[in-house]
Amino acid sequence: MNKSDENRLDSFQYQCLKKALQIFWPNIISMDELNEYTQTARISQEVKRRRWNWIGHVLRKPNDHHCMIALTWRPEGKRKVGRPKTTWRRIVERERKQGGWKTWNEARESARDRDKWKQSVMALCATRHEEDR
């Protein structure tokens, strides 16, 4: 998921919440205010949280499990001209570094303790607005 996909999902959620609450044109409400009022998180943050919960599940598998092999596999060669630069793997690698794990082995050690992993995922997926509280 790239930034434009996240924006599309968030705006769709915003439009649906406005319709459900019958908030129409002259009344303007920001996305953050609407999410706070409905006590929901942005859908893009929910996708990110669920992705990392799944990755934690995969990291607890043995090294020879096919999910673990797929997660750590690095394809050889170069991409064809015109292929998208932003891939699922690159997004996960970037987020892994933001989460404080330099290598997959560090992330794996963290994932073994489920409570610690849940706290790490929540910190990784926290929005700026939630961090200010």
Image (cartoon, rainbow, N blue to C red):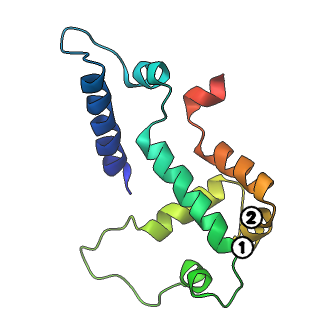
Quadrant including the N terminus: bottom left
Q: Residue at x 38, y 85 (%)?
A: 78
> Quick check: 28 left or right of 71?
left
Q: Crowding near pointer 2: few (<14 within 10 Å), some, many (20+)?
A: many
Which quadrant of the figure has residue 12? top left
Which of the pair 21/120 is nearer the observer? 21
Kind of residue sitting beneath label 1: Arg
Which of the pair 7/19 is nearer the observer? 19
Give coordinates of residue 37: x percent, y percent. Answer: 46, 18
Quadrant including the C terminus: top right
Q: Residue at x 26, y 15 (%)?
A: 23
- Report how far apart the C-alphas of labels 2 and 1 lie in the structure: 6 Å
Kind of residue sitting beneath label 2: Ala
Q: What residue is disc 1 on?
A: 60
What's the mark number on residue 130?
A: none
In this rendering, the answer to whether 133 lies above or below 3 is above
Are dots 2 and 1 in contact, CB under 8 Å?
Answer: yes
> Quick check: 4 left or right of 100?
left
Give coordinates of residue 110: x percent, y percent. Answer: 78, 62
Which quadrant of the figure has residue 117? bottom right
Which quadrant of the figure has residue 9? top left
Q: What residue is disc 2 on?
A: 111
